[in-house]
Image (cartoon, rainbow, N blue to C red):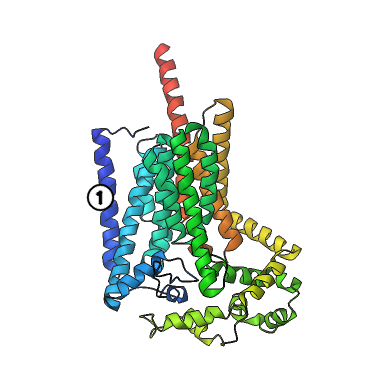
Amino acid sequence: MKIKLEPRRIWIDVLVLVIAFIYQAFKYAKRTGLQYNSDSVSYFYPSDLWAGEINPFRMWVFPTFLQWLAKSGTQNLTSGVLFFNFVCALGSIVVFFLILKQLLKTWFLPGVITLFFMQWEVVNRCQGFLLPETFCVFLSLLICYVWLKNIRNQDWLTGIVLPLLILFAIFTKPAFLPLLALYLVYLVFSFRFLTIQKKSTYGIVFISAIFCIWIFSAQNNRLFGYKGISMVSLNNNLANTFLSGGYKYSNDKELVDLLELNSKQGFYSAAFLLNNFSVDFYKQNLSRFPFQHKPTDDMLYMNSVPDRPNFPFERIQQFVDEATWNKAHAVFICKRIIAVFTQYLKAVIALSILFVIWLWKKIKYKTNLREYFYVTSMVFVLLSATAVGGIDDWERLLVFVFPLFIIVYAAIIDIVAQNLTKENEVVSVLKEKI
């Protein structure tokens, strides 16, 4: 289904995008420096994917980009990252606008909601940081846009691009990994609409994406002895087992005692005490970090963590398994999910309403509004996975999901507006007849 373009509305669309550009350009011009933290340091590992050199804590896309920028000096690195974030922010606004144009039927809503989105501080504040969050916002919206296009058109291009785009997003931030599972569900339910050629092509592309992730994990195992795509997940699991008290269920008394003795140092100290390779890795990267002479508080904390002998990853992983599969940790995770869903209760209610509308339309009117289903599924999957595997820093961890919240709100507002319009039309017709 193509978007109908009317001359007057085209000018309104152009005006919205011009206002967005001017606003973002003004914000960009006001930024004079780059903000950073200890997480920023972890991206400065010499990463060469083709030579087999990878960052065990960070996926390869952003470190490779920073490595390319850093070759031209600190000043160019600062200006380069700020300009890159500015371009990503503009791209996010354009894609966000296109999603709303594709999803909503009320003609003025895309422009109004886009104007709100462009000045939303939750997204804008990431642009001054030496982190990939702004790029991840752009990627999440781009995935959503391509997905919606494929649902409507079932064309070759979006069908091939979608899994590759999700793969690229995973290689930017592992939090996108659940979308690959959701894509598999989408692929299975779309099979009856596809030709044999598309079935085989999409299947090959999906299997290739899984193979790429497996290769990356295998390379991590070969170089560092860790079986996984990012060691950050191991550290988060260690921190969460400490918070939940699940670590007490481990049979490894030495590691349990180590955590007990250092329990007052903070919940993430568990990750650094047991996985001391994190500290070694941080200090290696710090020597390459161009802003090391102006450390932040969390960078000073990382420098103060004592250097200890490294435990084998097999032992750490066994400890995590024992500390995770118990009642205390299960209760903690359930409470964490409830807490996250309660914190973003308005979004959860909106998700539920949109899902109920999709179900009602499907059952009563046999209208399969799959766009609603997969938008809500994207948000729910990313929100749940981050709540389970992340740590208590939701404003930053979920920043790439927040724009999807607004899209869900917009869809509900559009449905209400459409119903009100229909009611007004019916009333007008009745008045004319009277």
The residue that appears at 64% across and 56% down in the rendered structure is 338
Q: Position of residue 7 (x, y in %)?
A: 23, 34
Judging from the image, what secondary structure is the residue with disc 1 in?
A: helix
Q: Identify residue type, mark 1.
A: Val
The N terminus appears in which quarter of the rendering? top left
Number of residue marks: 1
- Say if residue 152 shows up in the picture: yes
- Say if residue 32 shows up in the picture: no
In this orientation, which residue lies closer to the viewer: 425 or 313? 313
List the residue tagged with mark 1.
Answer: 18
Is residue 264 found left or right of 434 in the rendered image?
A: right
In this orientation, which residue lies closer to the viewer: 259 or 351? 259
Is residue 420 found left or right of 250 in the rendered image?
A: left
Quarter occupied by residue 350: top right
Q: Position of residue 306 (x, y in %)?
A: 57, 87
The residue that appears at 59% across and 59% down in the rendered structure is 387
Q: Position of residue 81 (x, y in %)?
A: 32, 68
The residue that appears at 46% across and 50% down in the rendered structure is 404
Q: Position of residue 90 (x, y in %)?
A: 31, 55
Quarter occupied by residue 31: bottom left
Badge 1 density bin: few <14, some 14–19, many ≥20, Cα 10 Å: few
Vertical relation: 258 (above or below) 94: below
The C terminus appears in which quarter of the rendering? top left
Vertical relation: 249 (above or below) 385: below
In this orientation, which residue lies closer to the viewer: 326 or 415? 326
